[in-house]
Image: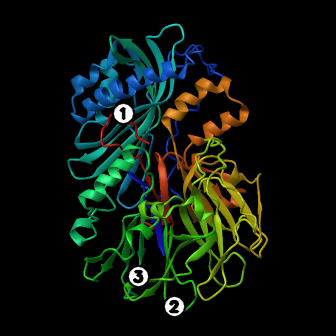
Amino acid sequence: MSRLVLGIGAFALIACTDASPPAPRPAPALPVDGTARPGASDPLAPPTAFVRDPAVSEAAALVVIDGTGRDGICAATRAQDRVALATWFTEDFRGYGPQARPEASTEPGPGLLREIYGAADTALDAAGFVAAWWPHVAGFAAVERCRFKPFHFRLEANDARSAWAEVAVEVGGRLADGQAEMRRGTWSVRLHLEGDRWRLRGARTGPLEVVRGQPAFADVGDQVGVGLYLDPATRERAAAQTDRGARTSIGGLAALDWDHDGFEDLLSWLQGTGLTLFRNDGRGGFEATPDLLPAREVGHALLVLDLDGDGVDEVVTSEVVGCEGDVARLGLYRRHGAALEALTQGLPFAYPCGRVQAADLRAGPTVTYQHLAPADVDGDGDLDLFAAGYSGAGSFSERFNYFQADDGEANLLFLNEGGLRFREVGRDRGLAEQHYSYVAAWLDLDADGDLDLFVGNDYGADDVYLNDGRGWFGRALDHPLASQGWSMGAAVADLDGDGVLDLSVSRMYSTAGNRVVPLVSDRLGAGALQGALTAAAGNALYSGAAGWRDRAVDLGLDHAGWAWGQAAADLDDDGDPDLLVVNGMTSHRTNKGADY
């Protein structure tokens, strides 16, 4: 069964091909001590003395993002208004725009063309720079995405009207012939404050990547009957939870042949709301069967798999469906055709149910398990289950630490004892940490023939547990996979084509984090500084053939936005696995509320 956990936002589709060169990388990060790079005489080099107060610096940076970027350059781009674009450059502007012709051209996938434009070496005034840049933003029938956002920002210490920044620039949309096109790169810019506007006084475009082609996929959900419609009360509840920051991930989607008729069906679920089967009718349509489970028994994660080897799938949900005395239960169900029968024993584990009132279970979970991962961990031929413990009644306590949290919910390991009965042994077998675990993956990390466990954590470094072959685990603190964290999704596949499995981990790339952390580097210890930089660094791809070295930057996989779940599959039928990364932010109903 393929599983894909969905977040809210845009999709980043990354095709892995040997012929495709790495995506253009942003300029190297500023030294965190605030010193200038070599070539400080360059007017586009960062200042040697800059404001280190994050409140002051970020106030100016946000004006650039909202004013110069969203309401200025991007507004003019969306309107295809060249005259308006030119007003965001000073009269004494000098800069270096993109070359007129691409330096490189490749075909990364069927129907796709990828070009790289370098920066010209001739200085231009404002009119010349706009003329060089305009072919890259003109001609869109509709601009669907525009971004001008600094990921490094330095406000001059001796001149509050002058600033330097490195800016992520993206423009994408549809061309007149229906093709999709995305242009992305980075600019080094000098900014000057005139009145209430930050205008560009200088700019140098970095390598500009252009990808165009016919979209490989079209959304036909409404036509084939897989639209998910929520009643007004459910939508209002979800919006209210979002407004107060109480909702992050919301459920998932699975493709599987539910009725074994040779056609892939779909399961869609929303935590605390419902589980819906979309049965494939074999003629290009789907028939919806809602409410396969009671709403309060639908968790963040759900598995469909045969746990007792009888050829009939069972369903497991990560939701706590019962809690009596000192025993809680995750939901376990037996298939009977299209119906599901709840097994009263469920997946039992020790839990002080006195902390969980019955009313809490009716209203929503007090304890959250974010992910379920099956594997035969003890080598006895049947499937065991790992449940990633996220938060519980004692979480987010006074000792909570964003960079090294240890008050999350305990992870669970259920050993399969046959007959659909399971025994929870996580802490006894060495899985003792409580690190707000978000995702897990089983793979052989030490090449000894058994399955080891990678656990991606939300607030702090990830965990690696090495299996002794019998289902007993030792935590490997110095393993390369445990050097980073703040992880959301994981996929195991041979992603670099060397014949050895790799591990891709989706994480947050934060422009704000990259702007702010260097400003306070002199106030952070080495551990906190590294943790803060890591938290904003983006996705990782650990190469199994390279000692689990992270190759994401080399392969252009680190920047996919605020990344959540992901899945590996051959999406373009070229024989190698690609990555689908779900990324974005959770948005309030009002744009005055801060997203998260």
Q: What separation in Å lies between label 1 and label 2 (alpha carbons)?
A: 62 Å
Q: Which residue is the site of mark 2?
A: 311
**Disc 3 secondary structure class:** loop
Q: Residue at x 77, y 76 (%)?
A: 470
Find residue 257 and name its label: 3
Circle 2 Cα neighbour tier, 10 Å, few/some/many (<14 / 14–19 / ≥20) = few
Task: Inspect the image, locate mark 3, and give the three-letter code of the amino acid beneath it.
Answer: Asp
Labels 3 and 1: the sequence-earlier one: 1
The x and y percentages for residue 325 are: 61, 70
The answer to whether residue 439 shows anywhere in this view is: no
Q: Is the residue 508 above or below the residue 363 in the image? A: above
Circle 3 Cα neighbour tier, 10 Å, few/some/many (<14 / 14–19 / ≥20) = some
Place residue 473 in its image quadrant.
bottom right
Say if mark 1 contacts mark 2, CB within 8 Å.
no
Q: Residue at x 45, y 51 (%)?
A: 248
The x and y percentages for residue 359 are: 45, 62
Whether residue 86 sits left or right of residue 428 in the image: it is left
Image quadrant for the C terminus?
Answer: top left
The x and y percentages for residue 450 are: 73, 73
Q: What separation in Å lies between label 3 and label 1 (alpha carbons)?
A: 51 Å
Q: Which residue is the site of mark 1?
A: 100
* Viewer-proximal residue among 106 and 416: 416
The x and y percentages for residue 564 are: 48, 53
